[in-house]
Amino acid sequence: MIELVKNTKIDFMGLKKYAFSFSAILVILGIVGTVQIYRGKANLGIDLAGGTEIQIKFQKPFAMDQIRALLAQAGHGDASLQQVSGENILFLKLRAVGKQDEKMVAEPVVSLLRQSLPGNPFLVESVSEIGPAIGHKLRQDAELAMLISALAIIIYLAWRFEFKFGVAAAIATFHDIFAIVGIFWILGIEMDLLFITALLTIGGYSLTDTVVVFDRIRENIRLRKMKTFSGTINLSVNEVLSRTIVTSMTVFIAVITLLVFGGLVLHNFALALAMGIVVGTYSSIFVASPVVALWRGEKMTEVKR
Amino acid sequence: MKSITGRITLIALLTAVSIIVLLPSLTDRLPAGWKDRMPKINLGLDLQGGVFLRLAVEIDKAIENTSMRYADDARAVCREKALPVLAFQKIGEGGFSLRFPPGDFATRAQAILKDEFPSLDVSLGEVKADGATVIARMKPGEIQAIRTNAVVQGVETIRNRIDQFGVREPQIIAEGEDRIVVQLPGVKDQQRAIELVGKTALLEFKLVDEGASLEEALKGNVPEEDQVLYQKSVDPQSSRATKTPILVKKRALLTGDTIKTAKVNFGNQGGGAHVSLSFDTRGAKVFDRVTAENVKRRLAIVLDDTVYSAPVIQERISGGEAQITGSFTPEEASDLAIVLRAGSLPAPVKVIQNVSIGPSLGLDSIHKGVRAALIGAVLVVLFMAFYYRFAGMVADFALVFNILFLLSGMAAFSATLTLPGIAGIILAIGMAVDSNVLIFERIREEIRAKKSVRAAIDAGYEKAFWTVVDSHVTTLITAVILFQFGTGPIKGFAVTLSMGVAINLFTALVCTKVVFDYLNAKKPMQALSI
């Protein structure tokens, strides 16, 4: 039998001071990030903010400065350019200027480059243009989706567990989501619809880990293995530790291959998922159960099914 | 199901059906009777390349255009009847007012207009010392008809254009009250397709006003019944575009809705392409009259407020044929012919979302996605076999079924596979073995508690069951919500993830258990490599 962790007796509850401080930092970061998103100060993808994205593959290497100057002349001085080294690929991102301005700019920009760089023919690999109105609508849809999943998760937990456990699991789940938003925001990584998809997926997945731990706590209370509630939590977390780690690891392996081999489109998505799995595993051990203990006290009353 | 044979038969049957359903999606080298009868996995636009357009139908503009056309006609009628219009004003949605000098002008105008325009509500407005107004509004039924027609007819017209352009399996659907979504998979000439879809293509024949001064008009003194339009021309040598202003009568003598056919011709001199039109009977009659009345005057051919040419009418044209010349490339001429044949859009549209993926990028995404999925699957399989040994291999065996059933399920529902959808498959692979991890860890605990192998296995499956269900439900909740709210590619993710997780409930619980049961059937296992 290969075992990653064997008969551990880690005092998880004893670590809760450090865990709570660490989590508080993550969550505060996330809340600040969320506020900044609403203030329009975050690096939002064009599908949420509106704008234009063009991917161009040149035949020969190109000079970024030259292209930047060309765009600036055409009034796109704020364009963000990104180069894929070795492949002569250029990513061009133009933000939507205002709510009223729904003019499509991809075609003029492409013709400008074609005319100005006659010696370096290129292929337009993809164009994505989203008017601010649609960006706004997609964003509203995303918000609604998050709200409904939050409600659905709480209803599910309320049905599955006693109230305090449900709330604790929900807190752990939102902790994870805020943590990822916070990390993405502070690192300035672009947040788009796929990122929101990743957040929802993380929400669903990290809940699983929490439920595994809660199931065991419930069972151990019934079996009266420990005298105190904190003791029961410590025992339960230690008992399921290898499960928690191994299940997270298999998904983590899958997500890392996605991150490494999935290409540029899926890169940030996979990154968010990978972070989410790590944070989700951490929170099911260090956030969910201690919150229950804090709230419930040391009473060893049975948990209703 | 208790019987081992029963379960094995079920799995074998499902496998056979899955293979039959799935194979047509994977290869073309199958008998036609099989290949054509089976549903297939669709590739999303992001994988096969193509264009996704979301159009906003500018219904208000259509209503305004119609009411302004009525206003122009009404003023023309008033001129004919010698009723002097002092002022004109737009009012509200689909309405306008005309002011007449004191006297009975307004009452007479009201009676005449009421007669001439049955689709307008014409009423008498304020009467003041310096004159009286007549207020005309389009009837609510008329406005409603424009509203519905704008989207329904718009979808129809765009479909017509796309069919003539030649796109395999285009999707053109109305969305809400004022949007149209157009999906054109596999289109290579994307900019051309976008222009073809988005052009209003309102063709009008208008007389050039040679009596009034163009210079004065450009300074802002445009005669009441005139407008300034521009003729664009491209110099073939320098490829520089120039715009020439032309003063034309606002009122169109003939519009494109009377066109029967339009086709591309190549002229003898210079070889430039032009488009020949032939009118239907009504159009031919009007064209005949118009040309007869205006010999030696210039007639501007206007498409979407751009003058294409403004030739002098040399003689009366009775054949019902006309030509549009201009500096067209053959593609431009062919597209122009298409839009003229398909007719104009009832209301202008604005592209509010455009996602165009080149075919090479789509292919690249498939390669990357499939490679990532394969590597992910292999790594997960190796990890399970390494960590849980024999039991891990049993889980791997179930994983193969999981993937097979997932793909054939997608084929059965003709689901669309997108790049995030491939990501969903990879994620589902990672989560699929989780169920078995939960079960195996439980079995290990039971074995440590000195239970017999057989009892440990049974207890492991039984006790882990609810945990497994929990983990699936939470993931399914979010996947279903994503499906409801997601756009195309993200829907693809929700589909693969939710189907993968749902199927996993069967494969992880049933397919693995039957292996252990089979091994235990003859003689209880003494040891389990787990």
Image: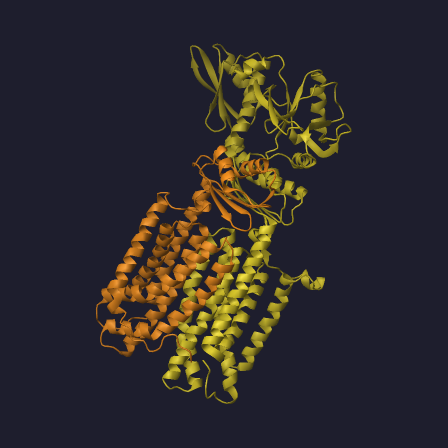
Chain colours: A orange, B yellow
Furthest residue in direction bottom, as rendered: B523
Residue B395, percent from left and from top: 49, 74
Q: Is residue B440 left or right of residue A222?
A: right
Asked if residue B156 shows in the view, the reply is no
In the rendered view, would you say A126 is above or below B530?
above
Asked if residue B19 shows in the view, the reply is yes
Name the residue rendered at 42%, 78% in the picture. Answer: A2
Pick the front one: A42 or B431: A42
In the rendered view, would you say A235 is above or below A112?
below
Pick the front one: B407 or B163: B407
Position of the C terminus of chain B, as image quadrant, is bottom left
Name the residue rendered at 54%, 59% in the picture. Answer: B369
Residue B294, percent from left and from top: 69, 16
Question: In the rendered picture of this protein, how many numbered marks are placed on residues?
Answer: 0
- The quarter of the displayed image where residue A214 is located: bottom left
Pick the front one: B129 or B54: B54
Pick the front one: A186 or B524: A186
Name the residue rendered at 45%, 50% in the picture. Answer: A193
Furthest residue in direction right, as rendered: B268
In the rendered view, would you say A239 is above or below B342?
below
Residue B477, percent from left and from top: 42, 60
Q: Is residue A26 left or right of residue A254?
A: left
Residue A98, percent from left and from top: 43, 36
